Amino acid sequence: MSNNDNVQKENDGSMRAPRTVGAGLFMILVGLFALYHSWGLTTGTTRQLGPGMIPQSLSVLLAICGGLLIVEGFVTRGEKLEAWKIRGPLFILGAVVIFGLVIKPLGLLLAAPIAMGIGGLASSETRPREIAIFAVVMTAFCLGLFKYALSLPIPLAPWLIGY
């Protein structure tokens, strides 16, 4: 076999970066999911944006970026797909669900650090002290941003101060 034969085999249209193609497919699926669920919202005009303009525009852009990733996966070399570990997605999803369940009864002062503590367990490389410091700093940031800067009606500690 000559070098020309090897070059032709490499450029025969086969997938050269399965991980990139997988990421592109995932982005397209998320974009289509978001577009489907925002389809009923009116987009408005560029002068007067409707509630559907941003979600629909971003979902289309996400799907386009996913398509570009798929093309890149067939053109450039990349990493192969590996087996997925369930620990990360399980703890992150669990943290989001727990936050949603406890935000009203416990308030932001407890719900945020609880969710961040659960989310921190997603990696075996994190240490409890790091998680605790991160949870305290991020809770203070979220408190300042959502409660005071944006004035959102999020309960702080209804069990302690009533709101």
Image: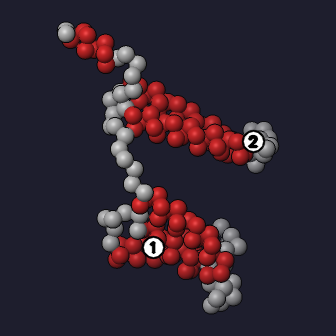
Residue occupying image coordinates x 40% and y 77%? 132
Q: Which residue is mark 2?
A: 39
Query: Residue 144 or 26: which is nearer the viewer?
Result: 26
Query: On screen, 12 above or below 79?
Result: above
Residue 10: quadrant of the picture:
top left
Q: Is residue 145 visible?
A: no
Q: Residues within 10 Å of mark 1 (few under 14, many from 20)?
A: some
Where residue 144 appears, as percent x and y from the top left, is 57, 73
Residue occupying image coordinates x 42% and y 68%? 120
Name the element at disc 2. loop
Q: Quadrant of the C terminus?
A: bottom right
Where residue 39 appears, as percent x and y from the top left, is 75, 42
Residue occupying image coordinates x 52% and y 66%? 94
Q: Which residue is mark 1?
A: 117
Question: Which one is earlier in the sequence, the residue at label 2 or at label 1?
Answer: 2
- Could you give the CA–CA distance between mark 2 and mark 1, rounded to whole angstroms? 36 Å
Residue occupying image coordinates x 55% and y 80%? 110
Q: How is the image coloured?
A: secondary structure
Residue 46: quadrant of the picture:
top right
Is the residue under label 1 in contact with that under label 2 (CB below 8 Å)?
A: no
Residue 124: quadrant of the picture:
bottom left
Query: Residue 107 or 18: which is nearer the viewer?
Result: 18
Which residue of the protein is positioned furthest toward the left in this rendering? Answer: 2
Q: Residues within 10 Å of mark 2 (few under 14, many from 20)?
A: few
Three-letter amino acid code at the position of disc 2: Trp
Where residue 14 appears, as percent x and y from the top left, is 39, 22
